Amino acid sequence: MDDLLADMTYPLHADLRRLLPVVGPARTTEARGHALILRQTPLAIDAGPAERAALFSVTEAQEGLGRTYREYAADSRYRAAWAVVTPQAKEAVLEGHTEEVRAVCDLIVKGRSMRASAAEDGTLRLWDPVLARVTRVLRPRFGGIRALWECSIDGHPHLAIGTGGRSAPLGSDDRGRCRPTPHAEGA
């Protein structure tokens, strides 16, 4: 796959509907950059080669991935000269759980977008999806977590978890230990 992605003209003519699902495991830096360009440019799927080069040039400029398509698109109707945007992670591998992940939930924590994941290892992890890093690991006392969801109690956001037949909204103490919120006692 890396050899195909290294050829910058190949994605201009390839059937992108068939190529996109298999570009994930690219190994070289160049191939990973070209795979990112393909994934970030869905409008290119139905475009012809000149239009694809122009579209790829915009993504390339936005993501800071060199000048390959910007130079190749010189004869297109348009091409990116530069771009200033806040980079965001679109796809990331979040590693840390030691057993099967059973639930994932997006939520807002103190005004920031976060992602929560829960696994059979008994941990609940909060992630910064932009940096693709864990920000907190919580260890509830009731074992493997099978479900989680964002909820609101009296207008305050909570993350609720479910384990083998029991669920409770959680908070945490000042040491990061999970505890049921007062509203969840006896749940």
Image (cartoon, helix red, strand yellow):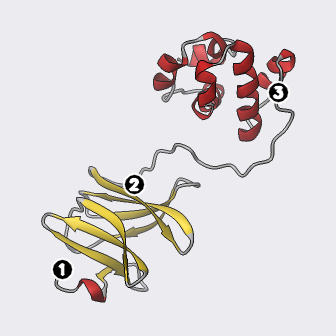
From the image, tell me which residue sits under label 1: 187
From the image, tell me which residue sits under label 2: 96
Earlier residue among tags 1 and 2 = 2
> Label 3 amino acid?
Arg
Q: In the figure, 38 relative to 146: above or below?
A: above
> Label 1 amino acid?
Ala
* Front residue of 17 and 164: 17
Q: In the figure, 171 relative to 81: above or below?
A: below
Question: How many discs appear?
Answer: 3
How far is mark 3 from mark 2, CA to CA? 40 Å
User: Can residue 50 be seen by looking at this rendering?
Assistant: yes
Residue ranking furthest to the bottom: 182
Q: Residue at x 75, y 49 (%)?
A: 85
Q: Do tag 1 and tag 3 residues touch (Cβ < 8 Å)?
A: no
Q: Do tag 3 and tag 2 residues touch (Cβ < 8 Å)?
A: no
Q: What element carries label 3?
A: loop
> Label 2 amino acid?
Gly
Depth-wise, is mark 3 or mark 2 nearer the camera?
Answer: 3
* Front residue of 15 and 34: 15
Q: Which mark is residue 37?
A: none
* Front residue of 111 and 4: 111
Q: Is mark 1 on a helix, strand or loop?
A: loop
Depth-wise, is mark 1 or mark 2 nearer the camera?
Answer: 1
Would you say 170 lies left or right of 45 here?
Answer: left
From the image, tell me which residue sits under label 3: 79
Q: Position of residue 99 (x, y in %)?
A: 27, 52
User: Can residue 177 be seen by looking at this rendering?
Assistant: no
How far is mark 1 from mark 2, CA to CA? 29 Å
Earlier residue among tags 3 and 2 = 3
